[in-house]
Every structure is written in C-alpha cells, then in structure tokens.
Amino acid sequence: MGGVQSFRELCDRPKNTNVRLSLPAVCFVWQIAMIILFGIFIRYDEESDAHWIEHRKHKNISSDIENDFYFRYPSFQDVHVMIFVGFGFLMTFLKRYSFGGVGFNFLIAAFGLQWALLMQGWFHSLDYTDGKIKIGIENLINADFCVAGCLIAYGAILGKVSPVQLMVLTLFGITLFAVEEFIILNLIHARDAGGSMVIHTFGAYYGLSISAMLYRPNLDQSSALHGSVYHSDVFAMIGTLYLWMFWPSFNSAITDHGDAQHRAAINTYLALAATVLTTMAISSLFQKHGKLDMVHIQNSTLAGGVAVGTAAEFMLMPYGSLIVGFCCGIISTLGYIYLTPFMEKYLKIQDTCGIHNLHGMPGVIGGIVGAITAAAASEAVYGQEGLINTFDFVGDFKDMVPSKQGGHQAAGICVAVCFGIGGGVIVGGILRLPIWGDPADDSCFDDEPYWELPEDEESIPPIVQYNNHMRNKDLKE
C-alpha cells in the first residue's frame, strides 16, 4: 500500500482554502448540461417513436404486444425498485445517517442515470446515419445497472463524504463503467448478464480504492455514531428484502427472451435461497451464545445473487446454483467477521458497508463460476443452436469454441478489477482536494451537517457501540 500512501500525499493540499463547490450550483449546472446534451444527442428508438406504426407494417408485426416495452418493462420496474428502494434503505443502518443513506442514494441514482444514458448510448446505441443516440426500455435498464456500480462504491464511503463528492464519484464512475463494459462485453466478448464482473466487481473495487485514498486516521472521533440502533437495522432490513426479492429480475432483465431469461431467474432464485440458510448458520456458529448478527443477515444473504450473475443465463443447473449460494454465504459472512477489520487495521481501507464481502469477493467468484461454466459448455448440454445463442457465437466470433470463451470470461474479471482499482485511486486523489466540503472527522456518520433535522427529534441515549459493518463485538474465543 506504499504507492497508495504516496499518491494520497501527492493529492493533499492545504486545508485552509475558502473555495467550496456548493450542491445547488453543481446540481443546476449539471442539469442544464444534461438538457443541452440530451437535446443534441438523445432521441427515441424505433419502438418508442411515433413512427412505430410504420415500423410495424414494414416488419410485418401483427400486434403492439410485440413492442419490447411489454417484454422488458416488468423487469425494468423491478430493477428500478432495487436501485432506489433496495440500495437506499440498505444504507439506513447507521443510527444518525438515515437521511443521508437513502437521500444521497436518491441523488446519485437520479444524477447518474442521465449521464449513463449518454455514455452507454455513445458506445452501444449511436445511430451513425444521423449521429443520434436512440433509447428505449432496454437503455433504461442498462442505465440503472450503470448507476448500481456507483451505489456499490458509495457503500464503502457512506457517511464520510459530502454530496458533491458523491456526484464527482458518480460522474467518473459512470464514465469508467461505460468504458470497461464496452471492453468486456464487446471487445473481449465476455457474457455477463447479471453483472458479477461489470457491475459488482468493478463497483466494489472502485469504492474500496476511493476509501483507501480517503482514509481517515482519526475516524474514531465519530465512533459513537458508527453503529446502528434497533429501528435503523429494521429499516435496513427492508432494503435487504427488496433486493432479495427482485434480484432474479436484476440478473435476467437484459438476457435474451425465452429460455435464457427463464433460466437466469431460476438460477438466481435458488442461489439466493441457499445463501440465506448458509448465512444464518455461519452467523450463529461464530457468535457467542449462538445468536445471529443483523449485519450478516442484511448483507451476506444477498451474496448468492451477486455470484450467480455472470453464469445466470448459462446451463449452471439448479444444483450448481445452490452450490454457488452455499459457498458465497460462507465466504461473505466470514468476510464481515474477519476480513473487514483486517482491511481497516492493516490496509487502511475503511469499508463502511462491507462492500468487499457483499460485492467484491462474490463478484470475483461469479466471474470465475462464469468462466468455468462457459469453458465446460458442450453441444450435448446446450445443443448446437443453443450453444450459439447462449454465447452469441456469431459475426466475428462465429468460430469461437467454449474452451476459448472461458478464457475470455476470465479476462473480463481482470479488466473489471483493473478499472475498479485504477479508476478508484485516480478519483480518490481528486476527491482529496479541499474544495468538496467533506465533513470533519468528528462529524462523520451524522446527518446534521447536510440535512435539516426535525426540531422535535428525540435525543438518543448513550448506546454501547453496536457491531457495525467494520468491527466484531461478539465472536467466539
């Protein structure tokens, strides 16, 4: 970590500057820029344009029900709920940062999806005949996926940064995401329907690298607020349940209609179920008196959905999905117990939400599972046409074979990790500049610096520090 420490020092500036970028100025300028850019580049695609009726006749489409809206919108709405409700409420566990957890999640998502439509549009949806980006319902799903990577990164620095810093994180995160997604999916030709590599692995290591760059040696000044209370954990569990229920839609939303989408939902459903039981077992096993830790139940129960993402549309088989969920429940829960405190103490990475355990390690496992499953694919299992359709062996990749596809899947993992770490170090250096209005060490994990709080708010009595997402209070000796 010596190189990171040196880069931190290089990016440091005197802290007595009076220059600060205000949230209203950034929001107004950004929204005006979006209006201008959308006016120049964004148009409806043929299925959302008023010329759809002409397109129907030209393509001999008999009914409006063939419009992609009717196939994709239910999945889009499920993903949308995950982004705004699932991720938002999952971050409300801190006793005095619920406004910031769900409110800044709202800000990042609304800010990021606009930029994502542009960035992903330039790479994937640009019509070279007129220079316009044509968007439809699938573009909205992909924009939400893009935002998800930034929300994952937000989890690592929850409560320690300003809203303007979060907007900068999102601006660069969306840009990096669009580039690495294009490289992995188009140039390398890896398959990643549920985003284990493109979304989760990238987002986790992007956030962890930023957290390393923004390391606060005196964060213990806010230790009294770095924990949860009963009702904040209940609210966070609401986010967990929304994410858990809708994750099959997340992993199947942009897969091919028919068997691939059907298979992705089944595989995710089973992996998630296995993860819950395993997490419960490991949490109880490693805690005194056999009690459960709510931190594990809120987070590790979702790890199976992350890890099955890449292989969700493959012939993973139902028992394979259960194996993936079983393994990730163990690894993620033990990560919260042992790895997160180790990372803070020795690697100087303060991971507020434990995203390395929920997204980082399961994302890498998902990439590995995808590579193995792809390399083991055969005509006996998929059929000749099924093999071509599942792995998109057409065009420049028509001569691809499963063993080679497995190597391409593995390469996708490396690209995601490199973009996450490299981009996070650079963006973290930018966020160290003293112009962003970040909170002081003794004001972290507190809504007061950025939110108007109710005047009649009840005072919170002193509470013995709860086992937050970084420390473990109650392990068996």
Image (tube, helix red, strand yellow):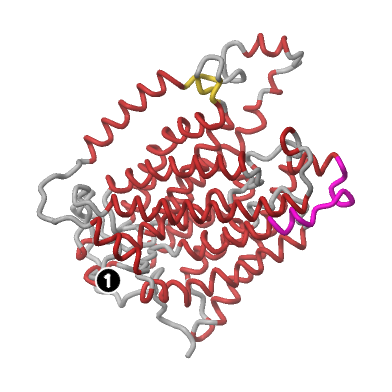
Q: Look at 46% across and 68% down and name the residue there.
A: 295
From this viewpoint, which residue is outermost toward the bottom?
A: 477
Instruction: Answer left or right for 221 relative to 322.
Output: left
Local secondary structure at mark 1: helix
- Residue extent of the magenta highlight: 371-384
Tell me which residue sits at (41%, 60%) in the image.
Answer: 208
Q: Nearer the viewer, residue 176 or 67?
A: 176
Disc 1 marks a residue whose amino acid type is: Ser
Q: Where residue 69 appears, x then y in whole percent?
A: 62, 27
Relative to 182, residue 453 above or below: below
Q: Is residue 130 magenta?
A: no
Quarter holding the N terminus is bottom left
> Could you tell whether 62 is left or right of 83 in the image?
right
Q: Above or below — where is 154 with respect to 383?
A: below
The quadrant holding residue 129 is top right
From this view, report whether residue 421 is shown above or below residue 60: below
- The spot of residue 19 in percent (x, y) is 13, 44
- Would residue 382 be counted in the magenta stretch? yes
- Viewer-proximal residue among 79 and 192: 192
Magenta stretch: dominant secondary structure: helix
Whole-percent x, y for residue 461 in the image: 24, 71
Mark yes or no: residue 228 visible.
no
Residue visible at 34% across and 63% down? 4
Residue that badge 1 annotates: 223
Q: Residues within 10 Å of mark 1 (few under 14, many from 20)?
A: some
